[in-house]
């Protein structure tokens, strides 16, 4: 068994000792894609809604408006019925 002869025209690169050639590499942060949705209109809308709600509650407070204990706030009737008597204004 014999090994094939080397081709004379091709030489493998050898390791050179000493200082390596200087290499300049520029590293920059990766560019982020621009956000498509803006958040400031939503923030402004929430602030306006809170200011309006505060104004309404302040006016109610200054006028002395109260909510009685027997007022149906959830939409269901009292303990005895469906709440139809509160719509017509009749009391039991």
Image (cartoon, rainbow, N blue to C red):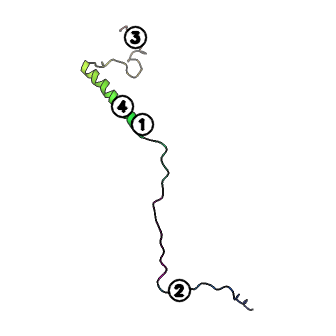
| SS under mark 4 | helix
Q: Residue furthest right?
A: 1
The residue that disc 3 covers is: 85
Q: Nearer the viewer, residue 22 or 12?
A: 22
Q: Residue at x 25, y 18 (%)?
A: 63
- Residue 48, located in which quarter of the rendered image? top left
Label 4 vs label 1: CA separation? 10 Å
The residue that disc 4 covers is: 48
Answer few, some or many: residues within 10 Å of disc 1's Cα (few below 14, many 20 plus, some between 14 and 19).
few
Relative to residue 30, is residue 41 depicted above or below?
above
Disc assigned to residue 16: 2
Q: Residue at x 48, y 58 (%)?
A: 30
Relative to residue 64, is residue 31 depicted above or below?
below
Relative to residue 83, is residue 37 depicted above or below?
below
- Residue 87, located in which quarter of the rendered image? top left
Answer few, some or many: residues within 10 Å of disc 3's Cα (few below 14, many 20 plus, some between 14 and 19).
few
Magenta part, dominant SS: loop
Label 4 vs label 2: CA separation? 72 Å
Q: Nearer the viewer, residue 47 or 72?
A: 47
Q: Residue furthest bottom?
A: 2
Q: Disc 3 vs disc 2: Cβ atoms closer than 8 Å? A: no
Q: Position of residue 90 (x, y in %)?
A: 37, 7
| SS under mark 2 | loop
């Amino acid at each position: 068994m014999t090994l094939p002869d080397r081709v004379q025209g091709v030489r493998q690169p050898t390791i050179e000792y000493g200082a390596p050639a200087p290499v300049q590499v520029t590293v920059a942060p990766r560019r982020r894609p621009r956000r498509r949705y803006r958040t400031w209109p939503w923030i402004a809308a929430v602030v306006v809604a809170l200011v309006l709600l505060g104004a309404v509650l302040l006016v109610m407070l200054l006028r002395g408006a109260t909510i009685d204990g027997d007022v149906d706030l959830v939409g269901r009737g009292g303990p005895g019925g469906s709440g139809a008597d509160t719509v017509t204004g009749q009391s039991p």
